[in-house]
Image (cartoon, grey):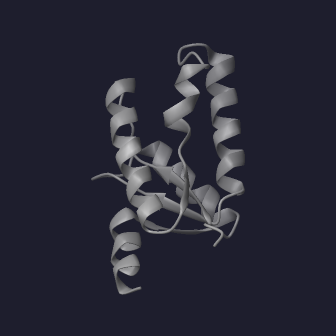
Amino acid sequence: MTRPLAYITAPWGEDHLENATLAANYCRQAYEAGYSPICPVLFMPTFLKGDAPAEVKDRKEMSDELLKRSRILIVCGDHVNDEVKSDIALAKHCRISYTTLSGVLAVSKLD
C-alpha cells in the first residue's frame, strides 16, 4: 500500500527541541492514520541557521516545494499563526486538501 504524502504544519515556537518533540508526535499520529508525513521542522534546523536571511528564504522555498508535492496538508496545534496561514493559502492555491490532525484521526477511526 502506498501512503499519501502529508505535509505537517503547526504554529512552531522558538525552541527547536520542543518543536522537534511536537513534530515527531504529530508525524507519528499521521503515520498511524495511514500517511507518509513530511515535516521540515524535524530536519531543516540541523543544516540551516534560522537567523541567516538567505537561509530563512531558502527554508521557506524548500518547505513550499515539499508542500506542493504532498497530497494533503495537516494542520496541528491549538491555534493558527501567520506561517500556518501561509501554508493553508499555498495548499488552497495548489488545490491540495487540508484538514486538522483531529480531522484526520477521526476519519482514520472510521476505517
Q: In this view of the protein, which residue sits in the foreground, 25 or 65? A: 25
The residue that appears at 58% across and 29% down in the rendered structure is: 44
Residue 74 visible in rendering = yes
Within the image, what quadrant is residue 5 found in? bottom right
Q: Position of residue 6 (x, y in %)?
A: 56, 59
The residue that appears at 36% across and 86% down in the rendered structure is: 110
Vertical placement of residue 44 versus 23, above or below: above
Q: Is residue 6 left or right of residue 26?
A: right
Vertical placement of residue 69 versus 107, above or below: above
Q: Position of residue 4 (x, y in %)?
A: 62, 66
Q: Residue furthest left?
A: 78
Q: Locate the C terminus by quadrant.
A: bottom left
The residue that appears at 41% across and 71% down in the rendered structure is: 104
Q: In this view of the protein, which residue sits in the foreground, 82 or 3? A: 3
Q: Is residue 64 left or right of residue 104?
A: right
The residue that appears at 49% across and 52% down in the rendered structure is: 8
Q: Residue furthest front?
A: 1
Q: Locate the N terminus by quadrant.
A: bottom right
Residue 11 visible in rendering = no
Q: Position of residue 22 (x, y in %)?
A: 34, 41
Q: Is residue 81 left or right of residue 43?
A: left
Q: Position of residue 85 (x, y in %)?
A: 49, 52
Q: How many marks?
A: 0
